[in-house]
Amino acid sequence: MSDFIILMKSELVVTTIIFLLLFVKIGKGMRNEKLLPLIQVLLLINVLFSFVFNKEGSLFDGMFSTTSLIAFQKSILSLAVYLISLLCSVWLKRSEHLPEFFMLMLSALLGMFFMISSGNLLIFYLSLELSTIPVAAMANFDLQKRASSEGAMKMILSSAFSSGILLFGISLIYGTTGTILFSEIPGQLDGSPIQILAFVFLFTAFAFKLSVVPFHLWTADVYEGAPIATTSFLSVVSKGAVAFIFITALYKVFQPLEETWYLMLVILSIATMVIGNLFALRQKNIKRFLAFSSIAQVGFILVGISAGNEIGISSVVFFILVYVFSNLAAFGVADVISAASGKESIDDYKGLYKTNPFLSWIMTLALFSLAGIPPTAGFFGKLFLISAGAAKANYIYIIIVALNMIVSLYYYLIVVRAIFIDKNEQPIDKIAISKTVKLALIICGAGIILLGLLSWIYEHIQSLTV
Amino acid sequence: MNLLLIILAPLLTALAVLVCRNKEQVKWTALAGSLAQLILAFLLYFAFRHEKESGEPAQMLFQQDYALFKNPNIHFHIGVDGISVAMILLTAFVVIAGVLVSWNIEKMTKEFYFLLILLALGAYGFFISLDLFVLFFFLEISVIPKYLLIGVWGSGKKEYSANKLALMLMGGSALILVGILGLYFSSGGSFNILQLANTNIPGSTQNYIFPLLFAGFGVFTALFPLHTWVPDGHSSAPTAGSMFLAGISMKLGGYGCLRVAAYLLPEGMKEYANIIIVLSAIAILYGAFATMMQKDLKYINAYSSISHVGFSILGIAMLTQTAVTGAVMQMISHGLMTALFFAVIGMIYDRTHTRMVAEMGGLMRMLPFISTVFFIVGLCSLGLPGLSGFVAEMTVFMGSWENTGAFYKIATIAAAMSIVVTAVYILRAIGQTVMGPVKKESFLSLPDAKWNEKLAAIILLAGILAIGVAPGWLNDLLRPETEQFMHKILGVK
């Protein structure tokens, strides 16, 4: 019993918060001004709690397991959710259905917790669904906007499609190996065509969730239509969680098929980077722009995953930690501007520095971190990913990756240029930023600068992966 | 001497600039900071000489080593040899002059000085790092300040130039990154320059890592045909930006070619030396002839920079001790000279509001100080004895001539011919601007240099004269290092 509580404590905390919110909702209800700070405090407790009382072990015959690495991954996800609740507080306060929004978001988070802890394909499938369906509802939260409903619809259809493929893959795996336990599958894999086919199906499902090219088509529309709180959740938390379990699946479960998936990763990561970058070049809307840039970032994550060793794991975990701060900072600024002025086009950002220097600097830091320019943490993140990928001495691949960094710098500079250099007759007015949002932006900015320079953080992650 | 001071000084200056309240505070903080950097650079020079004279055998002095990451194996490892000391002195001279000539910047003063000092920080860090990763980190730090300096404070087609510069330099960095990762993995996991120098990397491996590194640093130092960012970048940048770009940033590339590409990959260097000689000879001649066609003073100096920097690449590729010494001297000399050139052009432009040679004339009457400096720096550029340009170029030629073989002789002669062309364009440009009749009425009332401009010019002139009149000290500083360098390159057969 005590093992149950300790090992599942992250899940239990999140479940408790969900029930608290449910009671608030069916009870008398609270005004948003009071409720939101309460939720933020609860989420902060969730973050802090995730760092303590961590124990390794497994439950239910290995269906659920946790290690210190998994606990750290859960901390990253909790932290991201907490930051989102701070960053988007202006929009959230206006929302008519605040408790529901958080209930959905936390349910999805709960699903992700179970997903990265899962030890067999059944739990994995169930938790993947739990982490996807609430997000589709969240995407629909701008109730007046048609684009929001359209995005939600696209998301639900594409995720249903990918679930179908996933289930087909799982059934083939079960059929050929006779087991769904992660620990038993590797011994039964012999590389027969039907197993390769099953593996390709599973891989495809992951690719859908990570929006790897050519399975990325839903991403831009959903990101653009959904409210920014949802978009940032999708692009940071969902991606992060799926990347974590993807590593476990490849490294532990499908380890015998390493040659197959290395080749797939190389091809798909190049395609993802190139397509993501080329489409990002043409975007006019900041949300679509960030959507395509995050597709390109996934390409980089795949480079790290292709390493196939502990360095690969630690570099990906570190990159996602950095990515949380950088991407949330970018989305946070976009949300502040969109909430205050309703403007979401890159052209509207022209001359922003004149009126809003603070927002401009945070945005610039975030974009440079995404582009991988020192001294931001993104530089270290990208470098570790690339050096992990380079360990296989596939230099042509590494050169292509490095060249993609140039293309990505080009489009990040488009936004920087709009902010600092381009002139605008009617720049966005000076925006009064609330204290919570400012705090969150400062946290993100500090994270972007310090995460790389404080080398013990990466060392700590490495010590977890051994 | 604690080397950390060399990077702490600019870092603290940059932070102090950020908390300043008004423009005056910003300017004086930046000036005080750059003065401190200059003093530190001198202290470093004297401490270095003292150590060397007392018979310190180590190749790199004042080393400090802090482990940053275990895997990949990254250390914050710093140390200096004679070449780095010379480069740090150059940087300190250019920084203080750059701060002084930007005294009247009105637009976003705080941001301007912050970025300027950040750029300097990148350069200082680059010159003292002994770990390839740290070196790369500092190299990259300086890319974004350049972009913003040109984009925000520049003139002309500044957006285009800023973009082109940032992307080309980033492209260079990408090649360097792949190159240093190649070094890292083929040496069994080390970024340490001293360790890598003692590791035997197979010749075939060197042959494919070397071009990546040399081309990567070549972008920074405007190696033909990777020079195309130079004319646009330099001409669009604000005065101090051009000074930093040509005076410091291009030297990062030259230093990298020498310290990283050539020093760590001697087999590769020997393999590709002839190609590099041809390319640098082309750069020297092409730069000189292209300058002849220019009508804008900044373009004149930008193209002539391509030609002058070609000499330092030529010197490195000639692979004799004298030539390599000359190459480093040329980097220092050209850094000082071109910074002063851009400073003077900026001063003239501030007054006449034109940079077109044809629109100016007779400036000597109104601007005696500026015109005199312009004249001196022009003479330095065309290699008049007594000034630094002569010393450096002469050393390169002498070193190149030591090579027997018709190929080397022809390349040397071709490069030497460019001096005639240089004389033509320099004398023509100076003659038309400084002498002759005054072209516009409004020019008659132009004021001469102010105190800050005079000070900036005098500081840089002092550097030029110190090398030109008494090159011994620089030679003593560089010789032992280049000797060691040649020993390493030619020793491995």
Image (cartoon, coloured by chain):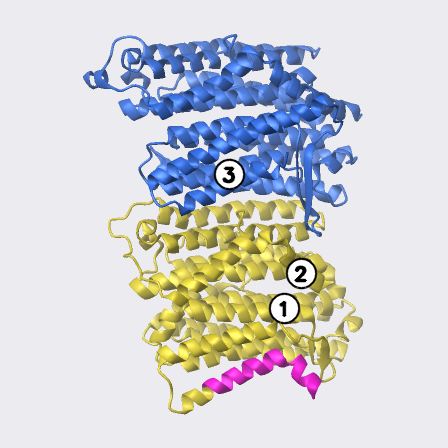
Chain colours: A yellow, B blue
Q: Quadrant of the C terminus of chain A?
A: bottom right
Amino acid type of disc 2? His
Distance from the alpha carbon under mark 1 to that under mark 3: 37 Å
Q: Earlier in the sequence, mark 2 or mark 1?
A: 1
Q: Which mark is residue A28?
A: none
Q: Residue furthest left?
A: B441
For the image shown, how many numbered marks are present on the structure?
A: 3
Residue underneath mark 1? A72
Residue B124 showing in the rendered view: yes
**Vertically, is B418 above or below A393?**
above
Q: Residue furthest bottom?
A: A27
Decide: marks 2, 3 in contact (CB < 8 A)? no
Q: Which residues are magenta?
A: A1-21
**How busy is the neighbourhood of tag 1: few (under 14 within 10 Å), some, or many (20 plus)?**
some
Q: Please report, as a chain letter, where disc 2 is located.
A: A
Q: Quadrant of the N terminus of chain A?
A: bottom right
Q: Position of residue A4 (x, y in %)?
A: 68, 85
Q: Position of residue A97 (x, y in %)?
A: 38, 81
**How busy is the neighbourhood of tag 2: few (under 14 within 10 Å), some, or many (20 plus)?**
few
Callouts 2 and 3 on one subunit: no
B196 and A444: which is toward the camera: A444
Q: Which mark is residue B10?
A: 3
Q: In terms of secondary structure, where does tag 3 sit?
A: helix
Left or right of A1? Residue B4 is left
Q: Nearer the viewer, mark 1 or mark 3?
A: 3
Residue underneath mark 2? A460
Q: Quadrant of residue A131?
A: bottom right
Distance from the alpha carbon under mark 2 to that under mark 1: 10 Å
Left or right of B152? Residue B288 is right
Q: Quadrant of residue A184?
A: bottom right
**Magenta segment includes B451:** no
